[in-house]
Each structure stands twice: as C-alpha cells, then as structure tokens.
Image (cartoon, rainbow, N blue to C red):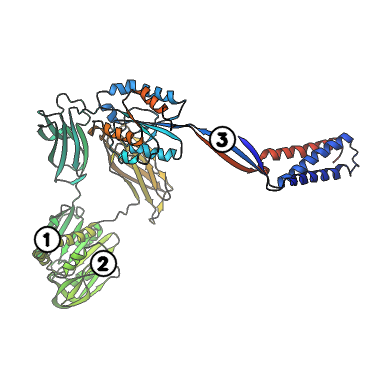
Amino acid sequence: MNFNILFDYPFWFILLCLLCGSIYAGFLYYRNRRDGFAIWQQWLFAGIRFLAVSLIAFLLLGPLVQRTMDTVEEPLLIFAQDNSQSVLMGPDSAFYKNEYLPGMQEFIENLSGDFDTRLYSFGEEFQPADSLVFQERLTDISSVFSGIEARYSNRNIGAVVVASDGIYNRGINPLMASAAANYPVYTISMGDTVPRRDLILNRVNHNRITYLDNIFPVEVHVEALRSQGLSSRLTVSRDGEVLFSQNLAFETPHQFKTVMVELEADEPGMHRYRTEISPVEGEVNLENNHQDFYIEVIDGRQKVLMLGDAPHPDLAAIKQSLEDNESYEVESYLFHEFDAALEAYSLVVLHQLPSSRHNLQNFFPRLMDSDLPVLFIIGQQTNLRAFNDLGQGVSIRPRSDDFSEARAEFNPSFTLFSFPDRKAGLLNNLPPLFAPFASYETAAAASTMLYQKIGNVVTEQPLILFSESGLRKTGVLAGEGIWRWRLATYHREGDHAPFDELLSRMVQYLSLREDRSRFRVNTREFIYENDPAVFEAELYNRSFELVNNPDVELTITGEDQDAALEYVMGRTSNAYRLNAGNFPPGEYTYEARTNIGAETFSESGKFNVSPLNVEGLSTIANHNLLFRLANNSGGEMFAPGNWNELTNALKSREDIKPVFYSRQEFEEIINLRGIFFFLLLLLSAEWFMRKRSGSY
C-alpha cells in the first residue's frame, strides 16, 4: 500500500502555514513575558503552539491523502457437483458413495494452492455444498451458470468443473445457458449410458377434481426398456384395494404403452390412488415403478328446486337444460306436492307463483328465512298483485288481462356476468315470450339483462332482471314460453348450447353465494414434496375491515394423527401469512384459530403432498451433453476418478492466471482521526504544562 499527499495549492503555501504558526507562537510567548517562564519552557511551549497552529492552517487548505492498494486475485475454480437422486440409480452407486466423494475432496485440496476453490452442489437449485447425499428430487444444470453469473460476475474465473450424469428435468438447455460463459468448462461424466432393463411409469394424467358418482378417466403412460418378450401387470389401487388391473406384454427393446383407466367416484372426499407396475426379472431400478396421485371427489352439485303452479313445458325445458350440466341436480314438483325442507337446495325456481290458487303466504316466509336465491317466472297464472307485495325488484301493474308478445333485446350495459356478443345477438332472433301488458317499475338497485321488444320498438320494460337484497339474490323472467327458445336455438344452431349457456349463467349467478365469513384461511390443496405449504389468512371486524392484531394459531396434523405441529402465523400489512416449509408425501389437515374480543373463530381444511419421482423417469446418462458442454467452452470431459488427468489439464492452461488489481482511495486529511487526536494531544499537553507552571 502506497501513500501520497495531494495538494491543490502551490508548495510555497506550506511556508505560509509555517509562518502563521511562527507569528502566533512568537506573539504569544516572546511578546508576553508576564508569566515568568524559564527560557527552556518558553521554547517548549512556543514549539508546541507553532506545530499545532501550523498544522491547523495546513489542514484548512484541504490536502488529500491518496492510498494505492495493489491486490492479487487468484483464479477461481468452481466445482459444481450434481446432487440429484439419478446419480445413485446406476450400478456404480457404491463407487460414488465410497470412493468418488473422498477423491473429489482430495482433488479440491490439491488445487487450493493454485486456485481459489469453491465447492457447490446443484439439483433443485445451485447452492454451496454443505453435504452431498444425492437426494435432490430435480436436476437443473442451467442453474450452475446462472448461479455463477449472479455470484461471480466480473471475477477472475479460471475454470468450472461440472460433475453430472447429464440428465436434467428443470430449467433450460445447459448448452444455451453456458453459451455466454467466458471461462472453460470441464465435465466429469457420471452415470451409465448403457440402457438397462427397466419399466417406467412415465406419466399419469388425471383431473384433480371430479364429482360424486361420476366415471373419471386416468391415462397411464408406461415405458419399457430392454424388456422384449416379458410381461408385467399394471394396477390402480386405493387404500390397498385394487380398482383396476391389466396385463402388459412388451415386444420391442424400447416400447411405450398408454393405458386408459376408468374409475368411479363412489365416495366424497380426498382420495389417494396408487398406480403400480410389477417388476420384471432382472430389473434393477424399482423406484420408477409406481406413482401416487390425488383426486378430490366433490359432492358439490348444486340442487335446484323447481315449483310450478301447474304442469308447463317451461319447467321441462329448464330441467332438461340444467341436467345436461353435471354441476346441477334438479328436482321438479307442483307446488301442492312439495313439503320437504329447503336447506338442501341452492336455488328455487317459482313458475307462475304466487298464483290465485297458491299465494305463498306460508311458504314465502320460510323461503326468506333460508336466504335462498329465487328465480320467478311470470305467466298467465301469476297473481301479479301478490307478486308485487313480495317486493322482488320489479313491480308489474297490469293495464288489462292481455299478454304481449315480447322479444328479447340484450342490454349492453349489463355487467353482472359476461355473455358473448354472438350469443347476445342470437337472442334477437328467438321467438317472443308472453309478457303481461302492464306498467313496469324496477327498483333502483335492479339490473336488467334483457329488455322487451314489442314489434320493432325496444322498450325500457324488463324481460329478465336481477336484484339483490342482503345476502339473497332474486331473478325475474317476466314472460312465459321459454321452451320455445330452446327449440328455436336447436333449429338455428344444431344444438341447445346457446340456450343452455344462457340459463346456466343465470343460475350460476343466482346460486353463487359470496363468502361473508369474517375469518378466512387459504392454501393450495395439492403440492409436491419439494414445495412449501404456504397459508394466508384474513380476519375482519364487525365492520368488515381487515385487522391483524390478534394472534392466529395454526395446527397441522398428519395422517398418523400424532405428529401435530403448532404455528403462529406471521403478520403482513393487514393480513396473515405462514410458510410452514416442506412436508413428506401424505394427507394433512389444518385448523386455524383466533379471537376478536369475546368472539372465537376457527377454520379447518386439508392439503395433500404428492411425491415427486421425476429423477427416476430417466436413468440413462447423457454424456453427449456433457461432451458438448465442455467442447463448446474449450474444456474437456473426464471419467470419474481421473483426478490426476483433470489436475494436469487445469494446471497446464496458460490462460488461467492471477489477476492484479490496483485500487486508489482519496480522503481529506482533516477527516483522519489520528490528526484530530494528535492536535488534541498537543494542545492538551501545552495547557497541562502551563497550568503546572502556575499560568492559565
């Protein structure tokens, strides 16, 4: 390290500083002799004052000190070791456990004198190699180069050694990831390139959700290597019970088979299924012979109750349309035949009710208490006076007993749910409905979807409208004869899809209930074992304002019901969040609890952790990738254990050299602490000696 003092003024300014110090000291000690100091004391005090004042004057000129520091950066040698499961799936797994790892450590230690060595592992991510146990469930070779770029950009990287079997199942192609590297890459070709006898469950395609009593498909893809002339058995089971089995015969050395399986959703809830293929003689790797998957069976079909004043083709058309949708289950009754409870239903359709025969005096209060949404269909039997008394978003006051032929005109300002423009245009060509000839008064909060078009005149009288009161939604279809729409749609389009979609969207909007709970907990129901379980919670006060003052406790319980884990969720700006970490495969339940004052809230649910067996799907090493990776960068590929050859190749490279850096720093001398303490020492010493000599 070298020091230089930089000075912006001419050199003779220093003489002025010395002159200032001399004048000040002379004036103080040689003009003032009242203190009676001895000659040697006067010279000593004057010298101290001269030095202090001269130094202060010099500092006021703002001199700088320049430090020049020379550093030597040894070349970096980055060793990246594949830590994934596929490394140990070959016949030489014992070699990698017992001989390879000690040899690797010795190799790195031998080069530590010539290189700045760094050891990393990669699999799911690129990270310092704390332990090498070959248990990573994914392999991302490209993360080596992105990780080096992030950590060692603009550093003196001498070489990178990548030890892998060349199998990757995450990230981009390593050849593309290393294209911009300006250092040589040496590779160590691990694994076995010879195909071995192996049966592989490559993929199981399935839906994650199905409905109760449905038949759902499962597509199983099987790959067979060197298994010609052999046979196996594919089974799909649940809770140890075999639900499907099929014998598979293999005729060629490398064969793919796809098996379609149909299973019945006979029980609601979350179910774990196991797909398994029996091993063949001589098969070494059995880790890829099975896969588990989860399917949630939902008894979630919404039940729609249809009540009519009398038999009518509208009821049949609506029922047929909704029953074509697996999400709905429809029950239809004449009003006087129905005496069941309402709690089991999600929507009630009242066709021409209330009527002169059924005024709903006893039924409607029950309906209001249940908060069930209602769709009223107005017809010739509807008692309009009784209907108006119900206050359902529109008041219909008849001008006569006649009914008008009203076509549909879509309201472009309607926003409660979307409806495609093409299908909205189709409504204009449908036959008319029979609507009361009356005056219509809509509530301010009502939203009209279709207007009545009488002849060629589009009126502001609603044909279909929706309103909402509290938690209950109401729809009104102010005309009968909707069965004609279904027939006309089929005649024009060749199917009932446009009509069915219109009706389904109406029913979906009415039956969908907003979540008004004050405590809500959300998490992903399906995760893999390498993904963390993340929970988010929201808590509302009585004014439905988000709060997060109270603690939220979360308990997670596994399938054994013994290992319950307790957590306290962390707070965000106005909610809660918890990263509970990774869990082994299985089904877990959780329960969250909190309090606001004297009120207690709790939410529970389930999540499932699926095993990740990607590494076992391909066990044939890709040495060609490793060779191209090394060759494209000017490196070489070596076999495992050839540590001496690799050492010689690295040491013999003339382009791997230390880099010398020179760095300069500038600082004002007045900012140096040593200068301050030196001045303080000078002035303190002068003051102390003057006081000791009897002066001030």
**Residue 396 in view in this figure:** yes
Nearer the camera: disc 1 or disc 3: 3
Please determine whether, in this image, residue 545 is positioned above or below residue 178.
below
Above or below, 646 relative to 480: above
Q: Position of residue 324 (x, y in %)?
A: 12, 55
- Location of the C terminus (image quadrant): top right
Q: Is residue 607 left or right of residue 576?
A: left
Rendering coords of residue 601 (x, y %): 35, 47
Secondary element at tag 3: strand
- Residue under pointer 3: 70
Circle 3 Cα neighbour tier, 10 Å, few/some/many (<14 / 14–19 / ≥20): few
Q: CA distance from mark 1 to mark 2?
A: 23 Å
Q: Distance of mark 1 from mark 3, alpha carbons? A: 83 Å
Task: Name which quarter of the figure residue 492 lies in.
Answer: bottom left
In the rendering, at what x and y percent does residue 311 appear?
8, 64
Q: Which residue is mark 2?
A: 414
Left or right: 645 with respect to 396?
right
Of all residues shown, which one is farthest toward the bottom?
Answer: 399
Kindly identify which residue carries mark 1. Answer: 496
Instruction: Please identify the residue farthest to the front as the structure is shown.
Output: 654
Kind of residue at badge 2: Phe
Residue 176 falls in image quadrant: top left
Disc 2/disc 3 C-alpha distance (Å): 74 Å
Question: Which tag, 1 or 3, sits closer to the chain's start?
Answer: 3
Q: Is residue 441 left or right of residue 546?
A: left
Q: Is residue 269 above or below residue 378?
A: above
| Residue drawn at the location 80% of the way across and 41% of the way down | 50
- 70, 511: nearer the viewer: 70
Q: Secondary structure at mark 2?
A: loop
